[in-house]
């Protein structure tokens, strides 16, 4: 196991009706004026935004609003938010929504206290050392941004979708998580969230680091939980227990709990970020296509952990032919994704002829000569994986 520092100070406030505590939480963390960030309108339609503003008023907290954050959030909304916060002397950002809203809130929080262009942080020119506090009311279990120290933003003029990871500054101070808020999710969004949270575990699980039994078992147990609860939720969207288990799983898959002590991979995410940046697809759907392709490539190049995954997560019988065991595990993963209504090929994702050379160029321009760690992918390797995602 590698040395690690695990610092996860977010206060998670979980369960039915907990959004009514948002005003008290904002005050607890010392804010007098928040900017509420939200998305395309689901929180307006569900009445959540009205409930949250109501409890802020009761708690004597001033607020202003910035709606209109789109999935795969963009830099222009971050600039807009920074300007509002400076104008109105906002001292905390309250994200009410999913990963796109939370990531926008985090980027604004870092940008407000920085004199230069916030994109400097994403481009690696500057380090984030301070940011406004971010609080969250979560509406979709998926990206795990409510507990992560990451934010992912797309620069519109270059179509670069880049992630910024600064756990010591960017983790939200609190996250309100009421599973009932997820009942209104369209089935496709629920399924995309499931694929994303599974991917967050697998990026950590597929590691060459030895002696990580605790991480392995946490990962496998969480994957088994997600698979079980996702099947229930797809059939019974109003099942509280299954929604609650999925929601907490989404957090622990990405707040670091499952992967401490491991060298993480993240190649599948970086491959996918190119696809969602250029083609605008939903992140989880892109992962449902690219992760099985990445694993199939790995069955040829570094099979051992794929075999362990196939046996322990998908119940594939052990046998001497490792590749066969690995491929059977990957097949069961794909069948599971298909059962949730997810795509597993580019075509099913709605991209008939992906521009693979553009995807490869952009990936290696953004991430360097080699991508990932389980096997470090060269340009040729990433091209092969993108091609596999066309036919698998
Ligand atoms: O915009 P609204 O109208 O709110 O609708 C949203 C949006 O269309 C809808 N939705 C959310 N909660 C709902 C709801 N609809 C009905 N009822 C509800 N309760 O769902 C759609 C997707 O929302 P979004 O916030 O985009 O989803 P998600 O949480 O999957 O976030 C995806 C983004 O997070 C990034 C992804 O790349 C993508 O840009 N990621 C962020 C990470 C992080 N910060 O740590 C890690 C991830 O790997 C990921 O890359
Ligand atoms: Zn993800």
Image (cartoon, rainbow, N blue to C red):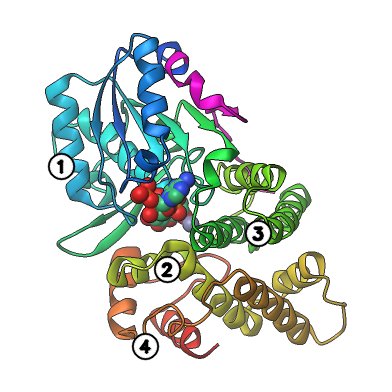
Residue extent of the magenta highlight: 1-24
Q: In front here: 75 or 61?
A: 61
Mark nearer the N terminus (2 vs 4): 2
| Residue at disc 2, CB closer than 8 Å to ligand 2 | yes
State the residue position of label 2. Answer: 272
Q: Which residue is mark 3?
A: 205
- Pointer 3 or 1: first along the chain: 1
Q: Nearer the viewer, mark 2 or mark 4?
A: 4
Say left or right for 324 vs 135: right
Q: Secondary structure at mark 1?
A: loop
Q: Is residue 237 visible?
A: yes
Q: Is residue 324 above or below residue 277?
A: below
Q: Which mark is residue 117?
A: 1
For marks 2 and 3, give the one nearer the viewer. Answer: 2
Instruction: Report the residue at 30% width, 12% height from top.
Output: 32
Q: Magenta stretch: residue 16 in it?
A: yes
Spatial CA span between label 1 and label 4:
37 Å
Along the line of sight, the residue nearer the viewer: 317 or 64: 64
């Amino acid at each position: 196991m590698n040395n690690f520092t695990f610092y996860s100070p977010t206060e998670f406030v979980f369960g039915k009706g907990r959004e009514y505590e948002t005003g008290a939480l904002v005050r607890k963390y010392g804010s007098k004026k928040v900017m509420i960030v939200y998305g395309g309108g689901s929180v307006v339609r569900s009445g959540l935004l009205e409930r949250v503003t109501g409890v802020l008023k009761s708690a004597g907290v001033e607020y202003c609003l910035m709606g209109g954050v789109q999935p795969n959030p963009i830099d222009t909304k971050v600039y807009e938010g920074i300007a509002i916060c400076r104008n109105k002397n906002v001292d905390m950002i309250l994200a009410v929504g999913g990963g796109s809203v939370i990531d926008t809130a985090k980027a604004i929080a870092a940008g407000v206290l920085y004199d230069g262009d916030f994109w400097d942080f994403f481009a690696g020119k500057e380090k984030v050392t301070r940011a406004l506090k971010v609080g969250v009311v979560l509406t979709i279990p998926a990206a795990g941004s409510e507990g992560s120290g990451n934010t992912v933003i797309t620069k519109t003029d270059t179509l670069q979708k880049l992630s910024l990871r600064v756990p010591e500054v960017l983790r939200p101070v609190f996250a309100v998580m009421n599973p009932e808020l997820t009942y209104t999710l369209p089935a496709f969004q629920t399924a995309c969230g499931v694929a994303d949270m599974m991917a967050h575990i697998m990026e950590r699980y597929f590691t060459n680091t030895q002696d990580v039994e605790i991480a392995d078992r946490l990962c496998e147990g969480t994957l088994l939980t997600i698979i079980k609860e996702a099947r229930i939720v797809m059939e019974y969207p109003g099942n509280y227990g299954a929604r609650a288990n999925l929601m907490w799983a989404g957090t622990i898959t990405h707040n670091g709990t499952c992967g401490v002590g491991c060298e993480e991979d993240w190649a599948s995410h970086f491959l996918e970020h190119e696809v969602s940046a250029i083609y605008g697809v939903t992140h989880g759907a892109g992962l449902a296509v690219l992760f099985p392709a990445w694993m199939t490539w790995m069955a040829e190049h570094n099979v051992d952990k794929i075999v362990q995954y196939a046996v322990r997560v998908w119940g594939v019988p052990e046998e001497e032919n490792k590749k066969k065991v690995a491929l059977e595990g990957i097949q069961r993963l794909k069948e599971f994704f298909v059962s949730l209504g997810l795509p597993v090929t580019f075509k099913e994702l709605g991209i008939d002829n992906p521009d693979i050379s553009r995807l490869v160029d952009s990936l290696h321009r953004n991430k360097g000569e080699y991508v990932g760690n389980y096997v470090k992918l060269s340009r040729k390797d990433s091209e092969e994986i993108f091609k596999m995602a066309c036919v698998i």
